[in-house]
Image (spheres, rainbow, N blue to C red):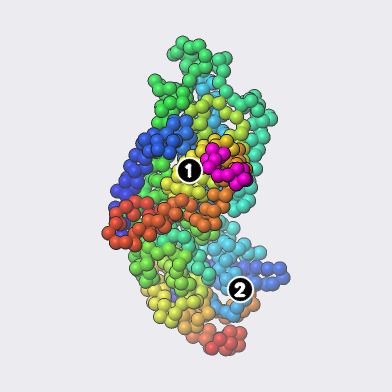
Amino acid sequence: MFNNPARNDWLLLAGFSAVVLCLPVLLEPIGAAYPALMQKFCIFGIFAIGFNILFGLTGYLSFGHAAFLGVGSYAAVWSFKLFTMNAIPAIVMAVFFAALFAVVIGYVSLKRSGIYFSILTLAFAQMCYNLVYSVLTPLTNGETGLQLSLQDPRVIDAMFIEPAAGLPRVNLFALNISGGGYAGFYLCAVMLIICFFIAMCIFRSPFGMMLRAIKSNQTRMRYTGFNTRPYLLAAFVISGMYAGLAGGLMAVTDPLVGAERMQWTASGEVVLMTILGGAGTLVGPVLGAAVIKYCENIFSSFSPGTLHGAFGFLPDAIEDPIVSFLSLFVGDGWNLTLGVVFMLIVIFLPGGIMEGLRRIRMMFNRRPGNGRKIPATQTQPAE
Amino acid sequence: MSTRNVVLHVADVHKRFAGLHALADIDLQVEEGTIHAIIGPNGAGKSTLLNVCIGRLAPDSGAVVFDGQVITGKQPHEINQMGVVRVFQTPEIFPDLSLLHNVMVPAFAKRDGPFRLNAFQPVWRRTDIRDEAMHWLEDVGLATQSHAIAGSLSRGDKRRLELAMGLVQKPRLLLLDEPTAGMSRHDTNSTIDLLKKFKGRGMTKVIIEHDMHVVFSLADRITVLAQGRIIADGPPDEVRGNPKVQEAYLGGVH
C-alpha cells in the first residue's frame, strides 16, 4: 500500500539538493550560471515555497506577502547597521520580525475567508508600504531606501574588528556574502534546501493533512472537533517567516532596501510563481519562481535592436511590423509576456508546470516497464 | 429502561425563523445506549433540532444539556470534543482527500484534540490512526477504495464514508440525519446492521429518518414532530398505533 514513503522522501530531498547545488553547472548551457541570478532563483524559491504552505495547503490566497518580504529586508539591514555585518543575526532578525508582523496581520485577516481575506491582507500590505514612505521614515529612510553608511554604530563588529576604509561587506565569518560571488549563492542555496526540507515535513505531517482538510471543507473540520483558527494562523505565520527569510536573504546578498519591495506587485508575483509552478505541490513553486525570474532576465534584456538583429533576414516591409509588435513584449514590456503565459497556464493547465510534467509522465507510463521514478513525486497530486 | 441515564436533554427549546415557528416547546430526553428516532413530515423541524444540538444554530430560548452540561452557546468543535458527533443530511466529507485520509482526520481529532502543531512526524508513521481508519472503512464496506478521492464517490457511498468518519470518533452521542437516503436497499440494510452492531456499548444514537423500514428496525423510542411540536413520544409500537401520528404522517407515506 505504501511502498516505503521515507525512502521516497529522502530520494526527493537528495535529488532536489543535488539539482540546487549543481545549478552553476546545470544552468551553464542556458547562460544563467552567474551567482546574482542563481541566488535570485533561490530567494524567490524560498518565498514561493512559503507562500505555497499557506495557499497550496489551506487555499487562503494572501495578497500581502510582500509586506513580510519588506519587513525581513529592513530588519536585516538594521541588524547590519546596529550590530554586525555577519549574515546570521541578520537572518534571525528578519525571520523574527516577519513572524511578529504575520501574527498580527494573520490574526486580524483570518477572521474572514475567501476574497475578504485576500482583500484584508492586501490592505495590510499597502498600509505597510505607505507607512514606510510616511511616518516610518526615520526607520526606513523613506524614498531613498535604507542603506549602510560609515557612521553606523555596528556595536558588535566595533568590539572585535578595526573598521577598514569604505563600506564593509556582509560576511558569514570568513566568507564574503554580498560581493556577488558564489558564497552568496551557496548561502541562499543551503537555505533553500533547508526550507524545502521543512516544507516537505509539513506536507507529510498530520498538521499538513489538517490544512488540506481545511481547504477541502472547513465547516466539516469544525464539526469534526478541530479549532481551525490556530491551524490557519500557524500556517500563515510559517509562510510569513519564509517570506521574511527571503527578504532577509535579499538584504544579505545586497544590503540596501527600498519601499518598492513591499509593493503589491511583489505580492502578485509570488502568486504567479506558485500557480505557474503548481500550487499545492512541493517542487512546483520553486520551478515557477525559477522560470519567472529566468524569463524576466532574458526578456527584459531584449531591445528592439536585438529583435532587428534576429529578424534581419526578412525584407524590411515585413521585418518592421514584426519587430514593432514583438517589442511590446520584451524589455520593459516583458510583463505583457508574463501575463499572456500566465493566462495560457491558468486556462489550459490549471495545475501549473507540475501538472504538465505529470501528464507527460503518464503518457510515457502507459508503456509498461518504466515505473521506477513515479512514486517519489506522484504522491503529491494524488493527495 | 426508565432507570437509564438521560444523556441528552433538549429542555424547552424554541426557535423562530422570520415568523415561522420552527421549534416550539421541544422537550426531549434521550436515554443512554438507546437508538432514538425522530420522525415527522418535511418541514417539521427535525434538522433544525439537530442543528441546535450541535451548536450550528442558537435556540431563541431553552437549552440543550448533554451529559449534565449545558452545550448551547459552545463552539461546534467543543461540542464535538465532548463526544457529540453529527452525520449530515447532505454528505459533508473532504472531497479532495482520499477515503483513508477522510477517516483519519476525525481520528486525529479524537486522539490529538482541537489543535496540535504536529509538523515533524509524517502521517504514515501513525499506524495506530491508519489502522483504526481502515478498520472503520472495512466496516462500512469501502476498504477496497481507501485510496480513491472521496469527491468521486456516489452519494450513497459518501454517506457510508461519513458514517465511518463519525464512528471512528467513538462518539457518546451520534446524531444521524437521514443516514440511508440515496442508498440502495442492500446498502440500507447493511447500514442498519452496522448501526445495530454498536447498539449499547455507551453509544447513544439519535436518528432522523423518512424510511419507516429503517426506523422500525432500529429505534427503541420514537419522537414524532409536526410543525415544530412533539405530537407523540414513546416506544415504536405505541407510536405506530397513535391515531394522531397516523393522521399527521404515517398515513401520508405508507
Callout 1 secondary element: helix
Main secondary structure of the magenta stretch: helix
Is A373 left, or right, of A30 in this rendering?
A: left
Q: Locate residue B191, reporting x and y percent.
A: 41, 75
Task: Specify the farthest residue to the left.
Answer: A369
Closer to us: A88 or A25: A25
Q: Which class describes the residues within 10 Å of circle 2: few (<14), some (14-19), or many (20+)?
A: many
Task: Specify the farthest residue to the right.
Answer: B19
Q: Locate residue A42, reporting x and y percent.
A: 45, 37
Q: Residue at x 40, y 35 (%)?
A: A28
Q: Locate residue B89, reporting x and y percent.
A: 53, 71
As drawn, A288 above or below A148: below
Give, as a three-letter code, the residue at label 2: Gly
Callout 2 secondary element: loop
The residue that disc 1 covers is A291
**Residue B45's disc number:** 2
